[in-house]
Amino acid sequence: MPETRNWRFSLDFEGIGWLTIDTPEAPVNTLSRQAIVELETLVMRFEDLIATGELLGVVLLSGKESGFIAGADITEFDNMTDHATLTAALARAHSLFDRIENLKVPFVCGIHGFCLGGGLELALASHYRVAVNDDKTRLGFPEVNLGLFPGFGGTGRSIRQAGPVDAMQLMLTGRMIRAGQARGMGLVDKLVRHRDQLRWEGRKAVLTGKRSSPAPWAKRMMGNRFVRPQLATRMRAEVRKKARPEHYPAPYALIELFEKHGGNWRDMIKGEAERFVPLMATDTAKNLRRVFFLSEGLKKQGLRGADKPMFRRVHVIGAGIMGGDIAAWCALRGLGVTLQDLDMERIKPALDRAKELFKKRLRKPVEVQNAIARLEADVTGKGIARADVIIEAVVEKLDIKRQVFAEVEARARPDAMLATNTSSIELERIAEGMQTPSRLIGLHFFNPVAQLPLVEVIRSSFNTDRDIAMGASFALAIGKSPVVVKSAPGFLVNRVLMPYMLGAVERVEKGESKELIDAAAVAFGMPMGPIELMDTVGLDVGASVAHELGHEVPEDSRFATLVSNKNLGRKAGQGFYKWEKGKAVKAETPAHADLAGLGRELVKPLVDTTVKVVDEGIVASRELADIGVILGTGFAPFLGGPMRARLDGKA
Ligand code: COA
């Protein structure tokens, strides 16, 4: 057998070839160029062994705990933007996958953990797929998040197996699905409960000559030439709700490929490279790769290996919207939580909201029941003494917060982490009265907690690197993305958002159309316009953050009048907009010659403030500022963040 670094192979006495992928020195398996070249030489050898009757079938498994294959190696993409190099690399992968598909004996994949992108494409080129039906197994095509679509034949083969509707949805959304769902779609042929059953099932599949069947006729017919144009139109409309073609060309290129060739999976594969290659060199793809690696980098802020802390119990003080939702989120993520407030009446609404969240996010009733049981109301604060982490989310009043921490410090375990969710009070001022001020860090969550991934980990001048790494570890443990920010008014996100939102409000005060302003910001690439955002956040909240940051709202302004009349935005049904069924009622947007240009103008204060925040050392690097602002404000990911966009002359 040829020497390979990424693969191990052995042939057993039954004639079954056991192939293991194990990318060297990496936590996940990837299909690097080297891995592809090595697999080529192996497949060539398989063909010889099949010809002599020595090899009856191949079972491919992963040698890693983390999963099967996480796709092509993204670290190589920056060197693959050249048209000729990429075309050649794709042709090579296509021909390899075709050869696997054409092997005269079964090639079976045993899948556990992540099976993504190129990994799923390889699995689809094999003859039979067995997957572990557990919480960790996830299959999907995340390429769209990198400004691409599947390029190793996955477009055609997923359509062949799952039919165009399911396959296109998977590719267009980048969603990861569980093994059971993949089985239902036809992407997987057999489910097992445990990883150690994969070998046995793989062996059985080889010995009985198992072959997967394509999608049934009823599913496939959705790809015929009469249905396809309508389907493509619907898909375009669906994608357009989330992404504009000028910002995110990949999903549109994929739909075009489908519209042209979706009736025949082989033609679809043939047309794949031609549309894929130009995408790789786009600024969008380059920036989305950057965003991927920046958000991966956030994971390194936590403690790792033997130092990695275990968080089991959290105590949250304050059952308002933020405190209640933080408690619910922690319980959803498997932690035991006590939620404290003055009386049951104040805690009950938070428990009700938590129940709704659990029902929405958890699949089985027993999981919902367990989550409900993990979240306990605690009027006396008995949970303080047991908790690993104590988070305060009471009203933004310094004396009350100080009082809370005096009590907490007296009752908490000496090793417990103490955190405040303050959005406006300097940490040093809260910590001043504590016996050990270095114990207090900030964990600034964003509303709605269940939807927004960012947690600003706030560092006071008392904290050590380890205190902050513990805070980041906690955020990671509950599935959030931590960005470390120095304690300074508005931290990062509120500080950059405020001048942008207030600038837009000022323009509306002066008579500009709010619809035009919002449309321009969206045309620039923001997920929502600044006026709609102000209404969504709540005008009272906006006014109070503005005040904290030293921006005064003029008393005779429309903004001030709306606040004093309790027209507080979405939650009140009226703000700058009237709100019906959770949606802003908008008048027609006036025409404008350069909508995106106007958007750039509107976003400028946000970008300029991000530069200031970096210069002032409030965040440690431009990269952290970029990813923090993207995660916290939704700032156009395809531009790579405000600092990157400015550097590129795009903002
Ligand atoms: N190419 C290169 N590196 C990859 C990779 C890929 N396809 N997928 C993961 N990695 C790297 C990560 O960058 C990280 O590197 P680091 O430790 O140096 O930071 C490491 O593998 C571990 O990944 P991590 O994200 O910490 O593990 P996780 O369990 O939290 O998540 C994945 C695993 C696979 C879900 C996640 O890494 C992911 O989404 N990967 C990208 C998948 C993808 O887009 N594939 C299609 C490529 S076209």
Image (tube, rainbow, N blue to C red):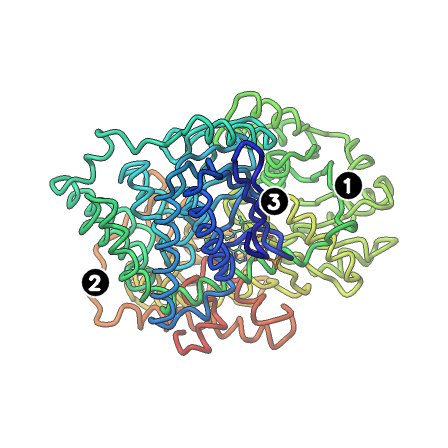
For residue 216, above or below residue 564: above
Confirm or deny contact between disc 2 and disc 1 (CB under 8 A): no
Where residue 111 sits in the image (x, y, percent)?
51, 38
Q: Amino acid at mark 1?
A: Asp
Where residue 383 sits in the image (x, y, percent)?
77, 33
Where residue 248 sits in the image (x, y, percent)?
33, 60
- Single out the residue that lies furthest toward the front: 52
| Mark 2 or mark 1: whose residue is earlier in sequence | 1
Q: Secondary structure at mark 1?
A: loop
**Horizontal arrangement in the rendering, residue 377 relative to residue 628 (left or right):** right
Q: Is residue 565 visible?
A: no
**Horizontal arrangement in the rendering, residue 199 relative to residue 250 (left or right):** right
| Mark 1 or mark 3: whose residue is earlier in sequence | 3
- Counting every numbered tag in the picture gives 3
In the picture, the disc for residue 388 is 1
Q: Nearer the viewer, mark 2 or mark 3?
A: 3
Q: Residue 316 falls in which quadrant of the image?
A: top right
**Horizontal arrangement in the rendering, residue 44 relative to residue 282 (left or right):** right
Q: Is mark 2 within 8 Å of ligand 1?
A: no
Q: Nearer the viewer, mark 1 or mark 3?
A: 3
What is the crowding at mark 1: few (fewer than 14 residues within 10 Å), some, or many (at least 20)? many
Where residue 7 sits in the image (x, y, percent)?
56, 51
Which residue carries the number 2 mark? 590
Between the residue at mark 2 and the residue at mark 3, the CA separation in whole angstroms equals: 59 Å
Q: Is residue 381 visible?
A: yes
| Mark 2 or mark 3: whose residue is earlier in sequence | 3
At 29% from the left and 50% from the top, the residue drawn is: 239
Q: Amino acid at mark 3?
A: Gly
Which residue carries the number 3 mark? 63
At 70% from the left and 32% from the top, the residue drawn is: 336
- For this rendering, which residue is in front, 137 or 420? 137
Confirm or deny contact between disc 1 and disc 3 (CB under 8 A): no
